[in-house]
Amino acid sequence: MSPKNILFYLKLSAFFVFIGRAYQFIFWDVPFRTLLWDQNLLEPILDVVFNIEWKEYVTSITYDYYIQTAIRINGFIYLICAVLCLIVNRNSLRIIRSFIIFGGILLVVLALLQTKSKFYVFAMFFEHSIQFGTPFVLLAYLKHSKELKFELQLKFLIALTFFCHGLYALGMFFPIPANFITMTINILGVSESTTKTLLFIAAILDFIIVIGVFVPKIAKSVLLYAVFWGLITAFARIVSEFHYSISLLSFHQTLYETVFRLPHGIIPFLLYLILRNKKIINQ
C-alpha cells in the first residue's frame, strides 16, 4: 500500500476525531465541570489562592460564563487541528506538528475527564485509544514511516479500544452503560434481557478482535469485522435517537457522536488494507 494512501486514511481519521469534538464543544456541553466543580480539589485552591468562597464560585453566572467560554475555545482549537490534519505533509510538519500535538493532548485530557466522570474506571479512558491516538500516529508516520512499528501502533490502538468496549458490553466487570441498552432496544426493538444477551455476544466478538488482530492467519478477517462493528456502533448514535417529528434537532444532537467515532472503523480498515497489500506482494 502506497504511503500516499496510508496518509489519506490517517488524515481522514484524525480529521473526523477533531471535527467531531469541535462540533461537540462548540454546540454542546462536555465534562469540564467534573474537574472545575470538584469541591474537594478546588475549594482549598479557591480559598487560599484566589480568596473566593466555594458557594460564590459554583453559583456565579460569571464563572460559569468563563467555563463555557473555555469550552468553546477548546472547540475552535479542535476545529483548527481538524483542518491542519488535512493539509499537513512532510514539508509542513515542522510548522504544524506542535498544533496537532497540542490538540492531541487536549483529547487525552478529555478522555481523563470522562474517566473521572465515570468514577475513574480505566476502561473509559482506554476505550478512547483510537481517538486520541490517531493524531499522534499520523505525526509519527509522517516523520518516520517505519512500517512494522506503524502496524504495531495501529494494532495496539485497535486492541485497547475494542477490549474496553467489550468490558462494558460484557457487564461482568462494570455495569453495562445505559446508552448501550437503550440504543439496542431502540434500533432492534428487542427486550432488555435479549439486549443483554446480544451485548454479551458482542463483547465476546470484541475480545476475539483483540486477540485476532495479532494472529497473522486470522488478522484480516477480524479486522473486517472490526470495520463493520466500529462503523455500526458509530452510526447507532444517530439511528437510535432519530425522531421524525424533530428530525433536524435529533440529527444535530447526535451527529458529533458518530463523527468522532468513525475512526473506530477507518483505522481497522487501514490496517486491513496494509496487511492485504503485504500478502499480495509476498505471493
Image (cartoon, rainbow, N blue to C red):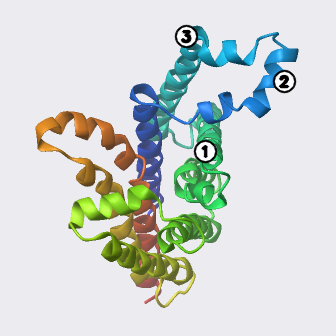
Q: Which residue is mark 1?
A: 117
Residue 280 position by quadrant: bottom left
Q: What residue is drawn where x is 11% and y is 38%?
A: 245
263 vs 248, left or right, is: right
Q: Position of residue 191 (x, y in %)?
A: 27, 71
Indicate whether 258 appears above or below 97: below
Q: Is residue 227 visible?
A: yes
Q: Which residue is mark 2?
A: 44
15 vs 237, left or right, is: right
Of labels 3 and 1, earlier in sequence is 3
Disc 3 element: helix
Indicate whether 245 appears above or below 120: above
Q: Position of residue 173 (x, y in %)?
A: 60, 71
Q: What residue is drawn where x is 42% and y is 57%?
A: 178
Q: Look at label 1 and name its amino acid.
A: Ser
Specify the farthest residue to the front: 55
Alpha-carbon span between mark 1 and mark 2? 21 Å
For label 1, the crowd category at 10 Å Cα-Cα, with few meaning under 14, some 14 to 19 and many 20 or more, is some
Indicate whether 151 appears above or below 40: below
Q: Position of residue 75 (x, y in %)?
A: 49, 28
Residue 160 position by quadrant: bottom right
Of residues 55 and 90, the one drawn nearer to the viewer in this rendering: 55
Q: Position of residue 70 (x, y in %)?
A: 57, 21
